[in-house]
Amino acid sequence: MTAPVVRQRDTAGWFGHPRGLSTLFFTEMWERFSFYGLKALLILFMTAAVTQGGLGFSSERAGGILGWYGFGVYASAILGGVLADRVFGQYRSVLLGGIIIAAGHFSMAFPTLATFYLGLCLIVVGTGLLKPNASTMVGALYDEDDARRDAGFSIFYVGINVGAFVAPLIVGTLGQKVDWHVGFACAGVGMVLGLIQYVAGKSRLTPALQRLGQTDRHAAPATGPWWRFTRDEWGRVAAIAVLFVFSSIFWGAFEQASSSLNLFADRLTDNRLFGLRFPSTWYQSLNSMFMIFGLAPLIGWLWIRLGPRQPSSPVKFALGLIFVGLGFVLIVPAARMAQERGVLVSPWWLIGLYFLHTIGELCLSPVGLSIVTKLAPARIVGAMMGLWFLSIAVGNKFAGMAGGMFETLPLPKLFTAVAGTTFVAALILLALTPWLRKLMGGVR
């Protein structure tokens, strides 16, 4: 089904964007607050001794659970996208997802193994409903030819990173310094705040739902088999599939922030800066801090400055892979010093790594969200957005596997292998770029 054309150029919101963007900005901000707050604590809680309130798991077992959890959170987005397209609609899917996520965090506030696993499962289900459909509604705030769309996704992405920046500082500190389960409960409170403002801003999302052929209660009516694409649509879907592979590789390296790099920060780094000691979970805020307070505006300005001369989406993806690889190249000497000399290394090694990783993320992640809303046929945009998040799911699984090798494989070898993989992938993608641009049919 072709999405209805809704010519309502809403410029009453932030920086001349639609008003619904601020509603989705804060919804995603609070959801990411809850998500990244939990993620900062998860592997540390699982590997902490039982006498310290943790579960006493080995790093291998904890890394495996973390990997499957990360995989499930993003893989469930496929089902969440399909349910939104065919049953609930995007608005109700986000609302139901947020309620289930909050229930998951509050379940983990109870100190039993059963409620721990129940909480993880609920968060997986809830995130699958919320995550792809919030992004889909952002794209639907704009007409197909609206030049504000990419900039709108950049603003939306800032919301993600505000939540990700604040969460380790608050949730992480409460979990490490007060009680693990107080931290988990705090994450749930954040999700509840996001739901309150989402419901309050429902009227601002009406134009987006109209473009999707939906209401706040119903999905768009089905008009035929979803798989009957035109030749151009098949080409665009194929381009998404190819970029999916390289996105998975990127996230497999990047998401080690919560696995191998999190353990490196906790066990092998002297967590003092300018004489002040700080919790190891605070490193999880660096990526978002760099993004919010400098890199996101700078790179956004750069793309606008370059205009039609800016790199195509596949080239931006390759740049993302290169920068995430450079981050691991930087940390190799520190890993060698820590393991061979038995010393705690300076925090500046990890600060430099996260700076490079942030540049890489800005080259790839918001571009990926935007390109899916541009390339995907309108009748399956929710499902395609869910499929796109599967690439992050695969990356999370790879990252969890790497975290499980923390105690068995020398870290310099592990980090060198990760860097080599991303560099090779970037070269392959650059070679494929001319062909991909043809598949994309003029979409940059």
Image (cartoon, helix red, strand yellow):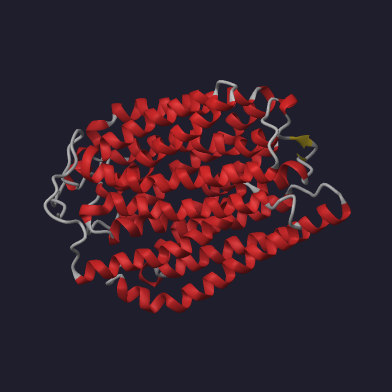
The quadrant in which the N terminus is found is bottom left
217 to 367, vertically: above or below:
above
> In the picture, residue 328 is in which quadrant?
bottom right
Return the residue found at the far right: 341
> In the picture, residue 352 is in which quadrant?
bottom right
Between 188 and 114, the residue placed more toward the observer is 114
Query: Which residue lies at the image location 57% right of the left edge and 72% below the top edge?
Result: 424
| Residue 307 percent across, percent down from the top left | 37, 67
Q: How many marks can you see?
A: 0
Query: Which residue lies at the image location 63% right of the left edge and 65% below the top edge?
Result: 419
Query: Which residue lies at the image location 28% right of the left edge and 30% below the top edge?
Result: 201
Q: Is residue 189 left or right of residue 388?
A: right
54 to 225, vertically: above or below:
above
Q: Is residue 144 left or right of residue 15?
A: left
The answer to whether one can see residue 16 in this image is no
The quadrant in which the C terminus is found is bottom left
Q: Is residue 161 left or right of residue 141?
A: right
Between 239 and 171, the residue placed more toward the observer is 239
Return the residue found at the far left: 223
The answer to whether one can see residue 114 in this image is yes
Q: Is residue 225 left or right of residue 32?
A: left
| Residue 79 percent across, percent down from the top left | 33, 45
| Residue 158 percent across, percent down from the top left | 45, 45
| Residue 253 percent across, percent down from the top left | 58, 57
